[in-house]
Image (spheres, helix red, strand yellow):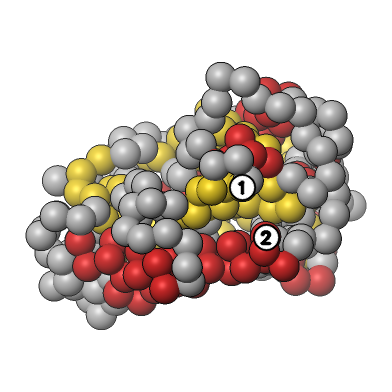
Amino acid sequence: MNRAVSIRRLGLAGISALFLSACAGYSSSALTPGASTLPEVVATMGQPAMTWKNADGSQQLAFATGPGGTQTFMVFVAPDGKLQRIVGVLNEGFFGLIQAGMTQDQVAGLSAAAHRQLGMAGGALVLFGKDAAYPHGTTNPQPLKAGDAVLLDGGGRLHGYASDITRTAIFGAKPTDRQRLIWDTVRKAQDAAFRTAKPGVECQAVDAAARQVVTDAGFGKDYEMFGHRVGHGIGMDGHEWTYFVRGNTTKLKPGMCFSDEPGIYIYGEIGVRHEDCIFITETGAENFTKWSGTPEEPAVI
């Protein structure tokens, strides 16, 4: 049974992963945007976008500032109300930290360090170029070069709950028409799954909706270029039953939580996957995170 019944708590893990493992950068030291107390932070940046209160009385608050929320600050407050630290998170900045010649392990290290900066465990699977066609990595990874797809799939843990999110971008060059077509097709497949997910619908119908988009776009038949399920349950475990997969007649119910992660994988060329976590409501589905933006700016939130 899917145990992710606490939308609020999983939402925290999901948004944290979005800040960090899904294409977000981080400051190497705590940032102080002209404030030393929480009231001063609020006066400077306005009301927080999200607030989380812990059992010990401490709090974390997320503030989004700048055009389109391009700069985020995570504010940590002690149980006695004192400001502990402020960490700046550049929502569009992670890809800006990546350089040609870097290895997948080096980029994965940036994600792990970003999670540590916020005091949580987490990281990302990182795949470049042709290697991204292997959804879970290769034994012979190649250094990054301009024009490569960069796929980051990761998440973190907070308060016992897991998050999972994937973003794919094109590094160092304008996406080719074919790269953009593949990227857009996967995004449309993700949306098709999302629109299909609602109470009473069988899990396999969600998988079928996304898979049909990929097939209709000419990227193989059935599982040919999209070889995995559309999504998995998520909650206290990163992957838990039930799944969006062919043959699963389980009917969706409000409160269930899933990943929505279609992909297109063309061996010797490219792999693209988009992943966000969603939860089933009384009338449909809602997402914990905002959908990916473009191949140039996949970290839009």
Q: Give the camera-side residue of 92 and 27.
A: 92
Say which quarter of the image contains residue 260.
bottom left
Q: Tell me which amino acid carries mark 2.
A: Gln
What label sits on residue 179 in the rendered view?
Answer: 2
Say which quarter of the image contains residue 140.
top right
Residue 291 drawn at (x, y percent): 55, 66
Q: Give the camera-side residue of 131 and 19.
A: 131
Few, some or many C-alpha atoms within 10 Å of disc 1 (few <14, some 14-19, many ≥20)?
many
Say which quarter of the image contains residue 251.
bottom left
Few, some or many C-alpha atoms within 10 Å of disc 2 (few <14, some 14-19, many ≥20)?
many
Residue 71 visible in the shown view: yes
Q: Give the camera-side residue of 5 and 138.
A: 138
Q: Is residue 289 left or right of residue 261?
A: right
Q: Is residue 291 left or right of residue 170?
A: left
Give the CA separation, mark 2 to mark 1: 8 Å
- The residue beneath circle 1 is 270
Which residue corresponds to the image point at 89% horizontal and 52% vertical from the top-left?
A: 34
The furthest residue to the top: 139
Q: Is 278 drawn above or below residue 164 in the view shown?
A: below
Q: Tell me which amino acid carries mark 1.
A: Ile
